[in-house]
Amino acid sequence: MLVVRQGTSWVLVAGSLLTVPAAVASMSWKRWAELQPEASPRDHGGRLDLGPIFCAEPFEGVRIVRAMVGSAEWDEIVGGLAAGSVRAPSCHCDAVITESTSTVLLGRDGSTWAHWAVNGAQRPVLGIVATLEAPEMPATEAIWELAVAPYIDRGPDRGAMFTQRHVVHWSDALLGINWPAGGDVPLPARFVIGRIQSQAWIVDLKPRYDTEDVVVSIAWDEDQIDPLGCAVLTRAAADGLPLLVRHQPISDLPRGPTTARVSTEPWELSWRERTLEVAVPRGPRRTEWGVMLLGPSGELLDERPVVRRAEQINLTLHVKGSSSLASVSTVGDQKPPPSDPERDEAVRAAVRAQSEARRAAAHRRISTVGELEEYLRWRFSCRAGEVLLLDPGLFSQKDREEEVVHFLAGFNRPIRALVRGVHQKARQALSVAGDITAKALPGGGKTLHDRIWIVGETAVLVGASPGDFLSDTAGAPRRATTATDLPFADAAIWRERFEEWWGT
């Protein structure tokens, strides 16, 4: 909380009450920011850090508070807030709420005052935004520096202490409230009650001016979501009118790099150690544009709003006393603003790029010489969890049982398979693969025709069994087959059906 003195009372002027994992609550916002996958080494430098719990008065009449509230105390805090006061463990203050919203999603990065109030969360926040009646803010400065003991003279020792006793932009660093103190920017008089959302979120956007696209960096929780099953919605507008709106499944986009180590699949690493990067056309230059991240069932996970963004900065230097131009340098987009015909062509180019990406994705899924083997490994590489395999013909190809089991073992995760039957050679091959279990379908091959692979909320319909699509040792082509993502609802039903048959 950020509170100010009004007479003999303290009054809430900005802050949040966020439900977060206990590990996040027990660290400072500074430390939490340092753990993010996009954090650079310079973010880890020394500066004042008061830890996860504090109550301090950096400037006269201004108090900053951070407290941990247990789940048993949550209702009491919220009830008090509605009644006009906050009784936090280390600070009691008044709170005057003039209005509040319904439940809304605040994206990881936004330009509203509500976004400013939860900047330290480093995640989208689902919650309610209350507007506060805030008194006038006392005088503050952008830098807060702790006083030094008078007995410490100037010198190296005092200088070494400087980085640990001062902080720039203290409201953001200590409270997670993105408000530039000491200036003319109004207070973000908002209080957000919500829960951080950590399924998947947009880490960064990096426009590329040479290829006229944008690289979207995505982080995710491998135990909650499959990022390759998500989609990106790009929007471009001019004067508030839409120019381009494109919905692109991530699995259809060109395979971008991840920051995971090459020898390790992304799902095996912590979210702190990896991001998934995808390139999407951003539409015409010098227009308002933004990106939405949609989940497998179409839900909004995060967004960067459609706004005009800085694309070009011109620096002009003059020699004092001279009227001649000394030097001009341009940072960012080097081209002049586009004309209307050029904007139209940029839209057409974006549509063509999307069509080409989808066509290339289709070719990756169609297998004739073992491509499907690589595709399936990639398709499940970002999601943790066991593989549920519905394949009546898994062991139908004679003398390929060991090859099939070796392929499945390469997924490095538990696998349960329902097949037509498990004959002697299949049992022998499975005996050396402890993480793979196969059972006969109830009713045998008559129960099921299709071949379905399931991990988490992702289900892929595969046109052939591994014995039919794995590459031939002699290099002979296989019959063409393909793999198709099933809709989210279908995946849920097939998972239920699998468990029903497995328990029969």
Image (spheres, grey):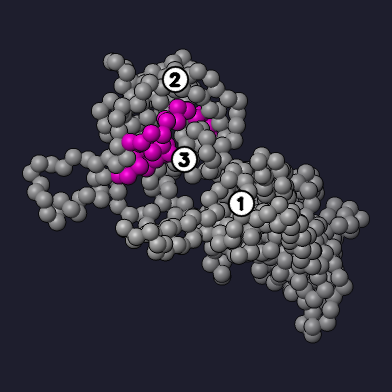
Q: Residue at x 75, y 46 (%)?
A: 488
The residue tagged 1 is 286
Task: State whether residue 62 is above or below residue 413.
Answer: above
Q: Nearer the viewer, mark 2 or mark 3?
A: 2
Asked if disc 2 and disc 3 are in contact, CB closer than 8 Å, the reply is no
Region rendered in magenta: 167-195
The residue tagged 3 is 119
Q: Secondary structure at mark 1?
A: loop
Question: If you read the primary sequence from the N terminus, does the residue marked by circle 2 or circle 3 appear first?
Answer: 3
Examine the structure image and report whether residue 14 is included in the region drawn in magenta. Answer: no
**Which residue type carries mark 2?**
Glu
Residue at the bottom extreme of this rendering: 474
Per the model, the C-alpha gap separating discs 3 and 1 is: 27 Å
Q: Residue at x 64, y 59 (%)?
A: 213
The residue tagged 2 is 133
Residue at the right extreme of this rendering: 446
Per the model, the C-alpha gap separating discs 2 and 3 is: 21 Å
Q: Residue at x 48, y 57 (%)?
A: 314
